[in-house]
Amino acid sequence: MTTTEKSTVVTDADTVDTAADESGSADRYARFRTAETVVPAISFAVLASLYATMSVLGHRQLRTSGFDLGIFVQQVASYSQFRAPTSDLLGTGYNTLGDHFSPITALLGPVYRVFPYAETLLIAQAVLFASAVIPISRLAVQKFGTIVGVVIAAAFGLSWGIQAALNFDFHEVAFAMPLLAMSMVALVRQRWLPALAWALPLVFVKEDMGLTVVVIGALVALWASGRTRVLGILTAVWGLAWVILAVKVIIPMLSSDNSYDQGSKLPPLGEGIADTAHGLVAGDSRAATAFLLLAVTGFFALRSPLLLIAVPTVAWRFVSDNTNFWKPIYHYNAILMVIVFVALLDAFARSHRHGQLSRRGRHYIVAFVAVFAVVALPFLPMARMVHAQEWTIDPQAATARDISQWIPKGDRVAASNNLVAQLVADHDISVFPQRATDSTVPNWIVVNRERPAGWPTDEAGDRQAIDRALSSGYDVVYSVDGIEVLHRGTGGAH
């Protein structure tokens, strides 16, 4: 008996509902083949355009920041110059691999060298996010037809987790989207070697992604046999080894304090589990996130064992004492959208295979998924694009661009967090007020007095930092649209 026959995973033989579908006419087969190509292609083109537009508009509306877009611009700029990845925003000469292990962002170095702008990263992220819809929608069309494929593509592409990620700067998780989608779709198709191969590079996205690789390898080891089972075990070992290597060796070696700082956000395991259980029962933001993760699929994804792939990401977030990790915001839920939607398709196929779900029942679930996506849309970031104001450039963003142009190349700048992203591609820059890890002496200070960034200090902290700067040799040389520019020494900006 072959590995395929022994497996309990859904095979490609389940891609149609009836024998009649399997032996359909040549014309219908031709239309099917066309749909499985056209739907993914159009979905990718539409979503990539929407994502890129939304991200660039957000940047021009001053919704990007030094933490995190500025950090990644400095990191990728370093790679583009064949240097170690550093970011003065994290600390003077700080190696970003001492903060998070994300060497995969080096792939953007050549692109940034040709297009050295902050928007380059935002557009690259849009393309990477959108590329995940290609394998997912193709799987949906092949197994359940064009209409289901279109609905899944739209519901996934417009889902709250993806929009929340795109609404918050750029992050390395963008690379995980297509890799994880390809790996999981291969699992559904029972193509073990591609599933493992696509999972392997995930360890270079971020230090915690190795745990996701562990689960994928373990599932293949469980469902396959022979050499393939061994490869699944080796893949799980690969994932775990990189987690340990990154957290225990690489990050501490390159960090400023010889430690893995992110680990300080994790309480003792028993305490974290107890607090998580209490929070889920009490209905804190973890409960809201868990509900929304499952609701996008009408809770039907629970019928697929592929949902186990989400466990490592959800676990470390919910156990953490950093409440930002618990919430359905920022970039933390993007890869979970890939997992739950592929799990939904797997659940459909499994249920049909075992006679547990009729075609009508599946249609009801797909209808719910579509309604949920449509109802949620007005409350999500992309809804801003229907307003004319969103298509304009914020006056402060335009002013920051002007300031960036007339500050001499080579001069150092410190700027408010919500202005950094407008300046970072043109200047060596750190955040203002300067943090303890920043030992630079900026030539220029650019402060948002009208809309204080609120971090690393509040408005009162900004005023105190400005007073200190004025008393130590800086002069106010420019003030417009609520942005104040200080220059060290005498003389104007021109």
Image (cartoon, helix red, strand yellow):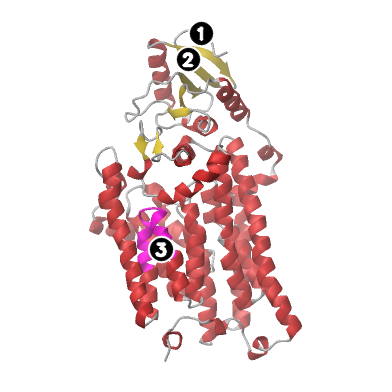
Q: Are marks 1 and 2 in contact (CB under 8 Å)?
A: yes
Give the number of the mark in front: 3 or 1. Answer: 3
Name the quadrant of the N terminus.
Answer: bottom left
Identified at 70% across, 87% down, the residue is 24
Q: Amino acid at mark 2?
A: His
For residue 111, say whether it is visible.
Answer: yes
Residue in front for this viewpoint, 397 or 288: 397
Residue topped by disc 1: 491
Q: Amino acid at mark 3?
A: Leu
Magenta residues (range): 199-215
Quadrant assignment, res 370: bottom right
Q: Amino acid at mark 1?
A: Gly
Of helix, strand and loop, which mostly describes the magenta segment? helix
Mark 3: few/some/many CA within 10 Å (<14, 14-19, 20+): many
- Of mark 3 and mark 2, the one earlier in the sequence is 3
Q: Is residue 72 above or below residue 191?
A: above
Name the quadrant of the C terminus.
Answer: top right
Give the number of the mark in front: 3 or 2. Answer: 3
Q: Is residue 490 above or below residue 56?
A: above
Mark 1: few/some/many CA within 10 Å (<14, 14-19, 20+): few
Q: CA distance from mark 3 to mark 1?
A: 56 Å
Residue topped by disc 3: 200
452 with respect to 126 (left or right)? left
Residue topped by disc 2: 487
Assign a secondary structure to mark 1.
loop
Q: CA distance from mark 1 to mark 2?
A: 8 Å
Identified at 56% across, 16% down, the residue is 479
